[in-house]
């Protein structure tokens, strides 16, 4: 019997790539507008829409003009929004954080009246933009953050957001026990259906610079290394995420994201909860500056970056480029 010789290579993976229809049918990761969430920075006053110099294409916007951003986003397919309130009044305890007339609460109420449940309104829950010292919690006399005193303030703030109509609250202060404290407070006040997206693994990163201008939240003294995570620690991130899950989080988040896709992937392996990844201001602007310098194709690099976050395990990508990326996807 004549020997049958198999040519090399026997397995040719390119067979699945040559035909566009076939390649599309076996594509493992899908990126759609429904996978993205748009951050918004809401300020005091009326008629305000002011560009943030270090964060291209993002504005400080007053409640009465939110529709100018929200409705074009909805037309592009973006129906998930993360609100950051930027108040004028600040004090050591962040008193205005749970003021029902503060920008975040007023924005939630307005969006619920206009759009009902056709969109998802989530709110950041932290004290950094409300305190005059810029830290995410209440300070002791020695300048250190009092974890447990901060928990009470975070819980009060989350309840005020839920009372205004928020579908979801997102605690970002990185205090131990913050998800549990907020879950208990929401349940005790009747907001059992309000979900929690925990900033479960939020790292002490150099990539938050533009955001701190946007949120007016840079610390006056010291830094946040005592409560945000060391960028060197991956296993600790899994512990943080699993603790949030145990305390009642509905969604886990990793922030930043592009430099931490290994963390997203590892948490994905260890939890069945939905995952969010926040492409933070510095990561977003890093890509934009590279594109403006001619080093990258803006459209291709943004699509690839967002797809990579989905591939790493993120169900939701929080991104300043949500509307632009959604429009590209709609045309493809």
Image (cartoon, rainbow, N blue to C red):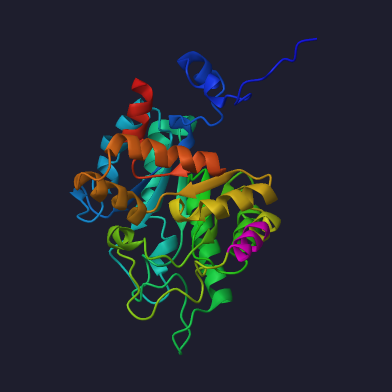
Height in image: 177 above or below 107? below
In x, y percent, where is residue 93? 43, 74
In x, y percent, where is residue 187? 65, 53
Q: How many marks?
A: 0
Q: 96 or 146: nearer the eye?
A: 146
Q: Residue at x 62, y 21 (%)?
A: 7
Q: Residue at x 39, y 53 (%)?
A: 280
Residue with the most extreme front position: 2
The C terminus - image quarter: top left
Height in image: 249 above or below 133? above
Height in image: 198 above or below 329? below
Residue with the most extreme right position: 1
User: Which region of the structure is painted magenta?
Assistant: 234-242
Question: Residue 78: which quarter of the image?
Answer: top left
The secondary structure that dominates the magenta segment is helix
Q: Residue at x 43, y 33 (%)?
A: 79
Q: 272 or 290: nearer the eye?
A: 290
Q: Residue at x 69, y 51 (%)?
A: 270
The N terminus - image quarter: top right
In x, y percent, where is residue 38? 39, 42
Residue with the most extreme bottom position: 142
Is residue 120 visible in the rendered structure shown here?
A: no
Is residue 279 visible in the rendered structure shown here?
A: yes
Question: Is residue 173 a member of the stretch shown in magenta?
Answer: no
In x, y percent, where is residue 194? 58, 46
Q: 196 or 213: nearer the eye?
A: 213
């Amino acid at each position: 019997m004549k020997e049958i010789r198999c040519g090399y290579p026997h397995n040719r993976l390119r067979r699945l790539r040559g035909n566009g229809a076939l390649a599309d049918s076996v594509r493992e990761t899908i990126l759609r507008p429904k996978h993205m969430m748009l951050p918004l920075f809401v300020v005091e006053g009326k008629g305000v829409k002011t560009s943030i110099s270090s964060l291209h294409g993002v504005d400080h916007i007053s409640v009465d003009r939110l529709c100018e951003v929200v409705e074009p986003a909805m037309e592009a397919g973006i129906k998930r929004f993360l609100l950051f309130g930027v108040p004028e009044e600040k004090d050591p305890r962040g008193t205005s954080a749970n003021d029902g007339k503060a920008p975040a609460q007023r924005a939630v109420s307005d969006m619920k009246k206009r759009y009902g449940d056709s969109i998802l309104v989530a709110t950041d829950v932290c004290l950094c933009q409300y305190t005059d010292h810029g830290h995410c919690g209440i300070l002791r006399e020695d300048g250190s953050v009092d974890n447990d005193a901060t928990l009470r303030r975070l819980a009060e703030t989350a309840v005020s957001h839920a009372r205004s109509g928020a579908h979801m609250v997102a605690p970002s202060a990185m205090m131990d026990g913050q998800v549990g404290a907020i879950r208990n407070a929401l349940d005790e006040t009747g907001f059992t259906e309000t979900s929690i997206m925990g900033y479960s693994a939020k790292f002490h990163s150099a990539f938050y610079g533009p955001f701190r201008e946007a949120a007016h939240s840079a610390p006056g003294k010291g830094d946040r290394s005592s409560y945000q995570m060391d960028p060197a620690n991956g296993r600790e991130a899994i512990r943080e995420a699993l603790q949030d899950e145990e305390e009642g989080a509905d969604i886990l988040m990793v922030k930043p994201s592009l430099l931490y896709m290994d963390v997203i992937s590892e948490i994905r392996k260890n939890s069945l909860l939905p995952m969010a990844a926040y492409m933070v201001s510095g990561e977003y602007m890093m890509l934009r500056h590279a594109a403006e310098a001619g080093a990258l194709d803006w459209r291709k690099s943004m699509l690839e970056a967002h797809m990579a976050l989905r591939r790493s395990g993120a169900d939701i990508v929080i991104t300043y480029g949500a509307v632009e990326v959604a429009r590209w996807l709609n045309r493809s």
